[in-house]
Each structure stands twice: as C-alpha cells, then as structure tokens.
Image: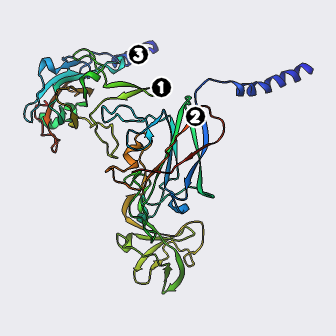
Amino acid sequence: MRTTTKLAALLLALPFAGCAFDEGINIHDMSGTVLVPKSVAPTAESVGMIYIGLYSGVDNHLGFPSPVAAPAASTAGADTFPYGGTSIGSFYTRDARTVCQRIESQTVRDAGANWELDFEVLQFPFYEGTNVWAWMDALVIDTAGTALNTFTSCDPDNGYFSYYQIEVEPIDAEAEGAQWRVSLEDSDLPDVPGTNSTRRYQDAAGQLWAVTGIDQVDDAVIVADIYSWGGKPASSGPSQPIIISEAELMNFGSQFQDVLNFPGKYVRGADGASPGDFVSENPVVLDNLSGNVEITVAFEVP
Amino acid sequence: MKRFAFVAICSVFFAACDPNVPGLDTGGNAPLIVDLDVEDPLSISATAESGGTVRGPDKGKGQRGGVTGSFIANGGPVCVIVDPEGTFAGGGTSHLDDGDIDLFVGRAADYTGTPGIAMGEFAGEYVDPLGVSHVLNQNLCTQYDYYGLPGAHAGAAAPEFCEVQTDAGVPFLVVGETFSVPPDDGMLSVAVQVRAGTCPLITESTLDSDF
C-alpha cells in the first residue's frame, strides 16, 4: 500500500518537474509604459498611434533620433531589423468617414504632466544593450476637432474589408405609416452611396432594417421592418447603430506591416512632409529585463 | 493471382517516378542552367532581346535551374523584362506550352551562384551594433502582388518585369529561375530584355522571342 502511494506521488510529480526545465531559448517578454507629455498632446484624444520597438541602437542618420539601419544598398536595405515591438492601439473603425483618422483599443491614463500608456512586447530575443525606442504618429486636428490629414502609418487599402458603413446617433424612432422614421443627432449625414435597395440600417440591438429613404434636411432615415422584428428600431443595445450600403465594398485601414522595420518611411510620411510626429529622443538601454520600462515620446520631428 | 495484382499495382506506382516518362518536365533536351553572357549576351536596348532554352529542374533532388545574364549599368533606372514561353506567344491552342520563370535582379557582386553552373541568390550579411547577424536580401527587383505587398511573381506564361535603380559602371545580373516548364516538351524558352529608363506598359506582346 505504501509503495503504491509513493508511486502515485512520483507519477504526479513528474509532469510538474517538466515545468522547471530551462530549454535555453532566448525568447522573452517585457512590459513598459510610454509617457506622452501633455505639452505634446493636450487631450487624451490627441494622443496618436504609438509604436514601440526593440533595436540594436539609435542614431541620427535620418536627421532625428531613429533606429540604426542596415546599409541602404538596395530597396531591401535600410531595414532596422527590430528584435521585437508592438503598437498601442489599432486603426479598426467601421465608419467610412474616419478611415485612418481614428484610433481604437488605446487606453490613456492621466498622470499629472503626462499621459501614460502601457505596453507589452512579447516573445522577442534579448541581447544586452538593446535600445527601446518609440514614436507617435500624430494627427493634425483643427480647432473644430476635424482631422486635417490621416495617420501616415495607416494603410487605407488594407485591413477590415466590408460594406460602406457610417456610425449614427439615433434620438428617436417614430412610426411613419408602416415604416419608422429614425431621427439622428446632428450627424451631418453624408451622401450614402448606392440606392435604397442596397442600404440597410442596423439598430443598437443589432437588428437589420431596410432603408427606404434618407432625409438629409432633418437628419433622419426612414426604415422598414424587413425581418418582422415586430417593434420599432431599438435605441439602446450592445452595438453602435450604423447605416450600411451594400453597393460599395471598401477597406477600413490597418497599420502598414513594415512600420517597425522602416520607421523613417512613416515618421515624416512618404513625402517627408508629415508634420507633428514625435519620437523618443533618448532610448532606454536594456541591460536586463527586470522591472517596468518607462520611455518618453516628446521630441517633435523637424 | 493476388501476387500478380500486387506486382501490377507496385509497377504502376513506380512507373510514375520514371524520369524517362514522356512529358515529365525534367526530361527536356536542354541545359538546366544557361549563361546568357555566353549564349546570347544582354545589351541595354528597347529593341534587342536575348534568350535561352532550359529544361526543368528535378525539384525532388533539390535542383534549381534558369538563365542568368549580366549588364554594365549606365546609371539611372533600367527596366528588366523576362517573358517565358506561353501558348499565346507560340500560337498554340492548349496550355501545354506554358512555362513559368521568376525574375530577380541585383548587383553581380551580391550573387551567391555561378552563372551556367549553379543558381544562387542576391544576398548580403549585416551585423548590427550588438553583434547580431542578419541576412540582407539584395534582390533589387521588387514586384508587387494584388495587395501591394512586395515579393510577388507572375504566373505561368506571364511576363515579369521591374525597374531597378543603377549606378553607372556597376555590373548587374539578371536571373530568371525556372519555376515550371511546358509539359509538351519539357523545355522552356525565355526572352530577356534590359532597357534604359522606366518600364512602359508591359504586355505579352512586348517581347516576341519567347517561343
């Protein structure tokens, strides 16, 4: 009996013994915080898309602090060969009016003089002396809050692919004959491409309605119950109401895949004239991977 | 009876591996690798065409084949075009006459192969400041796919082309690596041209010696 118990204990211990085995693979994770001074981004909304990369070094060959690049002997040259990296945020949007002008999935924390944003870089090889460098793709916004350009690191021809869609804010839904008139906030309802036969309205409950008319003057859409929901369009629910045009398929943008490899292409834009981007002037040099890394993005690229 | 059936099945199985089966694309009567500098040298011209004929590589043995040709750059952009044999160019009626060759261009000094003997790549090594080694892809011929991403190649029978920026006096090498050969005769003819300046609209009719 005692022997059986010992054997069982031994068998139970075996799987856990495997957990302590160090395979010696140079793959690590790290976490950190990006600090964006409020002098650089006055509001949390004005914090741009932030990229963090791990590089062999940082120099001034582009005229501003940027990662060391391989010799540019070919179109494939000038690659910075990052060891790892990530972005804070995504360009996911489903509003055709804001492609490459809106950042989602970005948590900005108020920390006195700075905005703080956390990041994690996973599964990268660590070499002593690695430089952590970050930059912020900023958007130029006028005083009315309108974006004057798009994010240069966003590729409008890629990413989420779907029907033309715009987000709307419904105020009320009133019966209009056998249909419903959905009044919207002053949303400056744009011309929605296609015809009524290809337009749909998805309410806050995710229910799809046929659009039979758009009232540009009073900011309203007239909808018909195509799936016999048996009530009026929902004003509250799990989703943002949208107007859809199935007549036009489009991309909703995503980050260019080589942003970390060729940051010089995007920090000033392809034409070298994208204003307002910021980089970390002083990279953080990693001698080990203990503790949280803090890096400040505040140097405006000339 | 069962033994006879077993032998018959085995024979059919192994017959498929016989390199002498007619139509197998490695069996063409042509060299595996052609050095155009010897057979039909390139010149920088919008009218002259060079060309060669190769047999298909036995990929199961790890063979690689194709054509290579060099030119001395005059500086500025050049347009490099390869056009593999195809049904359209040959006036044929079936796709048994279609072949595929992939285009690469680079500085001759970066080429790891030996013209006429062994195929290679355009490669270099970059050691970063922390001592980590990275392989540099020195292929200067960038072709873009449907999504605008670099590294694409055209399909069977379709021409491939790209613009390459050059420095005057530097030797460059054009490499066409055989991807597939026409199954009708196991041999692929290919036309190659290097012309000064940017690329015009390239069609199947731009080069006409690819058959």
The subunit carrying tag 3 is B
> Residue B56: in sight, yes or no?
no
- In this view, the residue farthest toward the right is A1
Report the Cα–Cα distance between label 3 and label 1: 52 Å
Question: Please, what is the three-letter code of the amino acid marked with disc 1?
Answer: Val
Report the Cα–Cα distance between label 2 and label 1: 16 Å
The reply, left or right, for residue B95 in relation to residue A177 is: left
Question: Please, what is the three-letter code of the amino acid marked with disc 3?
Answer: Cys
Tell me which corner region of the image, top left, top right, bottom left or bottom right, holds residue B98: top left
Q: Nearer the viewer, residue B163 or B2?
A: B163
Question: Which is in the foreground here, disc 2 or disc 3?
Answer: 2
Label 2's element? strand
Q: Are marks 2 and 1 in contact (CB under 8 Å)?
A: no
* Residue behind mark 1: B132
The reply, left or right, for residue B91 in relation to residue A103 is: left
Q: Is residue A262 above or below residue A166?
A: above
Give residue A191's position: percent from left, percent from top: 36, 73
Of pointers 3 and 1, the one earlier in the residue sequence: 3
* Residue behind mark 2: A286
The subunit carrying tag 2 is A
Q: Nearer the viewer, residue A160 or B129?
A: B129
Q: Nearer the viewer, residue B88 or B147?
A: B147
Q: Is residue A40 above or below residue A188?
A: above
* Residue behind mark 3: B10
Tell me which corner region of the image, top left, top right, bottom left or bottom right, holds residue B20: top left
The reply, left or right, for residue A102 in relation to residue B33 is: right
> Residue A66: in sight, yes or no?
yes
Question: Which is in the foreground here, disc 3 or disc 1?
Answer: 1
Give residue A198's position: percent from left, percent from top: 38, 69
